[in-house]
Amino acid sequence: MSPALAVRVRNTSIATALLSKPGMRAAMWKISVSALLSTLASSASARAEWVQVSKDDFSTVYLDAGSRRTSPDGIVTVDALTDYNAASPKAAAFGLAEKGLSEIEKVSLDCAKRKYRSEGGGWRQGQMGEGNITKPYPPKDGWSPVPPYYDGLFAKVCARTSSDERPERFEPPRA
């Protein structure tokens, strides 16, 4: 047996043994999901075309104009980045020190019913989606009303023309 094959067989045996122990499969799954979300979020923030859609004293919400996807049933999915102001009086109560200074979330919007669903995301250490993921979160199963902090995002994504009842396609500004 070649040394490389022996190492692969030994590593496979170790992995099989670890995964057979109670609770290890779930722990390995969580680690895998966290690593995947970290990789996806890192690449998402690096290549994104963030366009500001709303701002208040606590946060600024951005839309990645290039991430927009519309399903055949009219559900629009986009990437949203929320950048938080650590100097805001709301920061301590919101737990920014533990969560991070920004978060990137994949958001689905039902424009006809004004509903929202999180497709999952993650909190980031730094501003504008930079730094490591501090707290990933999974997708939600159900729909809920659009939260107030996403009113600007909903307005931008679900804008309608006066002559047409279909959602208008968002085009990023030309450079």
Image (cartoon, rainbow, N blue to C red):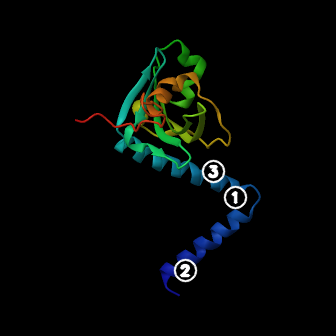
Distance from label 3 to label 1 (Cα)? 9 Å
Q: Position of residue 80 (x, y in %)?
A: 47, 35
Binning the other alpha carbons within 10 Å of mark 2 as few (below 14), some (14 to 19) or many (20 upward) gives few
Residue nearest the observer in this picture, 8 or 147 = 147
Task: In the rendered structure, find residue 25 and report the number of the disc placed on it.
Answer: 1
The residue shown at (53%, 43%) is 74
Residue 101 seen in the figure: no
Q: Reading the chain from its start, which is encountered first: label 2 or label 1?
A: 2
- Which amino acid type corresponds to the residue marked 3 in the rendered image? Lys
Binning the other alpha carbons within 10 Å of mark 3 as few (below 14), some (14 to 19) or many (20 upward) gives few
Q: Which residue is mark 2?
A: 6
Q: Position of residue 58 (x, y in %)?
A: 49, 17
- Which amino acid type corresponds to the residue marked 2 in the rendered image? Ala
Residue 173 seen in the figure: yes
Q: Reading the chain from its start, which is encountered first: label 3 or label 1?
A: 1
- Which amino acid type corresponds to the residue marked 1 in the rendered image? Arg
Distance from label 2 to label 1 (Cα)? 24 Å
- Mark 2 or mark 1, whichever is nearer to me: 1
Regarding mark 2 in the picture, which secondary structure is present there? helix
Task: In the rendered structure, find residue 30 and report the number of the disc placed on it.
Answer: 3
